[in-house]
Amino acid sequence: MNQASGNNISSVISRFGKRLQSFIRRRVNSEADAEDVLQDVWYQLTAAVDTQPLEQVSSWLFTVARNKITDRYRKKKSSSLEDLLAPDDEQAGAAFRDILLDDSNNPETEFLHTLFWKTLQEALQELPEEQRSVFIWNELEDIPFKEIAEKSGTPVNTLISRKRYAVLHLRERLQTLYDEIVNE
């Protein structure tokens, strides 16, 4: 399949489309995600057909799909400060966010803001320096991973992993505060 004709791509889509879509659908959370991954696979197929021969199309398609699913999962797992403010219970998470993002000068809200930031600072101090630094740079100072990688000489994937560990620790540490605020 090293010819770039539309007929070859169309035949591959009609031959593998349903099976590939079913494969993807079983591995993602929603139909919309499955459609996005499938479109990414078809897009990569059109690009690959022009640049390289695809000897085993079936194997290639399913490998690309698996990689796209993994990439999507990693992106969604990318943790952030927003994740700390959005626990699993969406309604309660929204209430927690509303309280923390409320900018009225209400004394109770000011107290909760102060308590949140104090607890966050204490939890940050418990982290290893590398995790703490990447979390602060990326989340609080809004420095992109690529820029942090260039400055520190650390690969982007390592930085993402460190930040993820930091967020997991911070989420666990802030859970008690979250429970107290939401359940008051």
Image (spheres, rainbow, N blue to C red):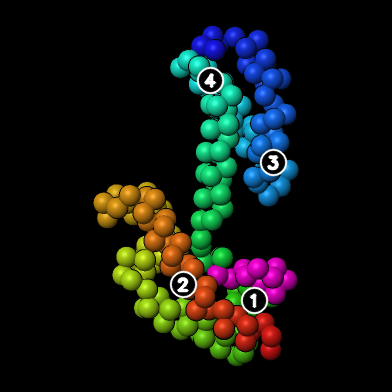
Q: Which mark is residue 117?
A: none
Q: In what element is the residue under mark 4?
A: loop
Tell me how far mark 2 sits from mark 1, CA to CA. Answer: 19 Å
Tag 2 secondary structure: helix
Q: Nearer the viewer, mark 4 or mark 2?
A: 4
Q: Which mark is on residue 56? A: 4
Residue range corresponding to the magenta coloring: 84-93
Residue 155 lies within the magenta run: no
Which of label 4 and label 3 is nearer to you? 4
How far, Cα to Cα, is label 4 from label 2? 44 Å
What is the CA distance from the residue labelled 3 to the residue labelled 1? Answer: 33 Å
Q: Quote the CA–CA distance across marks 1 and 4.
A: 51 Å
Q: SS class of the residue under badge 1? A: helix
Determine whether 84 is above or below 115 in the image: above
Three-letter amino acid code at the position of disc 1: Phe
* Residue bearing mark 3: 25
